[in-house]
Image: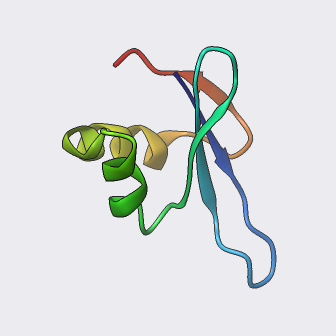
Amino acid sequence: MYIIKVKGVAKIPDYVQLRDDKFTLLAYFRVDRPDKSLDKIGLGDRQDYIMGIVNDLPFGKILKLEL
């Protein structure tokens, strides 16, 4: 799984993309509201771990997650 942090512009907030190994979009959520999206794809129990990575990840970088 890959994680990408996307910088928002003007009134558009910052977003996070979670993608599988084939780079198919699994989840797309605001940095400040990950709850429902992570629960929907079965990663609600890993929210603290994922958001810890998101907070340290620079915008525009792709990081491979080992879950």
Residue at 80% over, 81% down: 10
Relative image position of residue 42 (x, y in whole percent): 30, 39
In the displayed orientation, state which residue is furthest to the left.
Answer: 45
Is the residue 33 above or below the residue 41 in the image?
Answer: below
Q: Residue furthest bottom?
A: 11
Q: In this view of the protein, which residue sits in the foreground, 49 or 22?
A: 22
Extreme-right residue of the structure: 9
Horizontal side, residue 62 vs residue 34: left or right: right
Instruction: From the viewer's side, name the closer residue of 65 and 23.
Output: 23
Give above or below for 48 relative to 11: above
Q: Residue at x 46, y 21 (%)?
A: 65
Asked where in the image residue 46 lies, by quadrant, the reply is: top left
Percent coordinates x, y for residue 56 in the rendering: 47, 42
Location of residue 14 by image quarter:
bottom right
Q: Position of residue 6 (x, y in %)?
A: 70, 52
1 shown above or below 17: above
Image location of residue 51, percent across then percent down: 37, 47
Give the vertical position of 52 relative to 32 (above or below): above
Quadrant that contains the C terminus: top left
Q: Residue at x 69, y 33 (%)?
A: 61
Instruction: Count numbered badges in the picture.
Output: 0
Instruction: Identify the colour scheme used.
Output: rainbow
Residue drawn at x 31%, y 51% is 39
Residue 31 placement, left or right of 10: left
